[in-house]
Amino acid sequence: MATPIHFKSLESFRAEAGRSVHLAIGMFDGVHRGHRLVVESAIRAAAEEDGLAGALTFWPHPSRLFKPDNPVPMILNSEVKLAELDKLRIDFVIEEPFTKAFAATDSSQFVAILKEKIPGLASIHTGENWRFGKGRLGDVDFLRRISDKENVRANALQCLYVDGERVSSTRIRHALLEGRINDANRLLGYAYESIGTVVEGKRVGRTIGVPTLNMPFEGDLAPKFGVYAVRASRADGDERLRGVANFGVRPTVNPLDKPMLEVHLLEECPYSYGDQLRVEWLDFIRPEMKFDSVDILKNRIQEDIQKAEIFFKELPDG
């Protein structure tokens, strides 16, 4: 399937004339398992009519506008979120800028505005707790009523529950902050990942025999500082090389002001400065800590490497 087309706003959207459009709508922070059910609903509807399936999402989060001093930290930055949506076999993604003007949209006019920008709009798909319009006054029951007037079907998907709790972006945020990467990945439905560019560091890793690929962390929500088993690939590749990574501020040697992801590959490294990499976070090994000497640090890193190697040996796919 072709790579989904990205549109930077509803205003810029263009679609093939004569084909129906089926739209999943939401913030989709994390693109977790619950979000995927919404997108899959749009895909099924499109398949039944040989139509187009797409996602309408927003950036930044509304809290950036309404609570700028305490915004909701995003699980994924815009680039990674779009990359995850691209994997879901949809035809397009619209990332509408969440501005004061958009926030002021009257909920009663929301579907009419969508129909104006997307003439072929045939169905809308959301989660059952989705709210929309000025003051978030619109709910899914209201969405169904105003959609009927525009000859658009509205489908609200029930929330997904895992281990008796609703799958939510909030639940995933807590798991990441607490270093429960396995729980986060189970709720996401895929391995949490970072996309970033390799930069030149202080070469501390090389001096202690553990060279690393250094990637500044680009995102709102920093997971728990610590050592993780990871897999790395080029952002547009699928090689998935095994590695162990430290995420944090490196308190023992040349402490950092901002968090960095430092990846040491457990196999031959084909990457260099300037390469854009995708790193999957697979298992939490230990918290980041300050050691009394470089020798103690070196010994602990070797233990971390051994634990990562054991982790990969025990994986079903190695």
Image: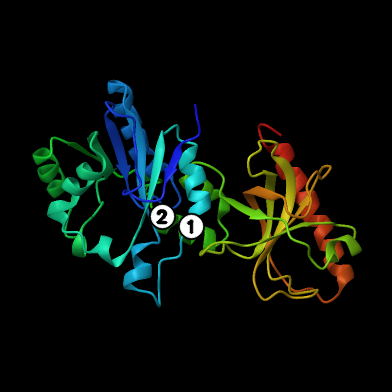
Asked if marks 1 and 2 touch (Cβ < 8 Å), the reply is yes
- Residue occupying the point 23% across, 55% down: 131
Q: Position of residue 225 (x, y in %)?
A: 63, 65
Above or below, 300 relative to 313: below
Q: CA distance from mark 1 to mark 2?
A: 8 Å
Q: Which mark is residue 309?
A: none
- Residue occupying the point 45% across, 65% down: 73
259, 109: nearer the viewer: 109
Above or below, 198 relative to 122: below
Above or below, 151 relative to 302: above
Q: Which mark is residue 75?
A: 1
Q: Residues within 10 Å of mark 2 (few under 14, many from 20)?
A: many
Residue 157 visible from this viewpoint: no
The answer to whether 122 appears left or right of 85 in the picture is left
Query: Looking at numbered disc 1 in the image, what kind of residue is underneath it?
Result: Ile
Q: Position of residue 190 (x, y in %)?
A: 53, 42
Task: Locate residue 148: give its quadrant.
Answer: top left
Query: Looking at numbered disc 2 in the image, what kind of residue is underneath it?
Result: Ser
Which of label 1 and label 2 is nearer to you?
1
Instruction: Please tell me whether mark 1 sits on a helix, a strand or a loop.
Output: loop
Residue 271 visible from this viewpoint: yes
Task: Locate residue 300: give its quadrant.
Answer: bottom right
Q: Which image quadrant: the C terminus?
A: top right
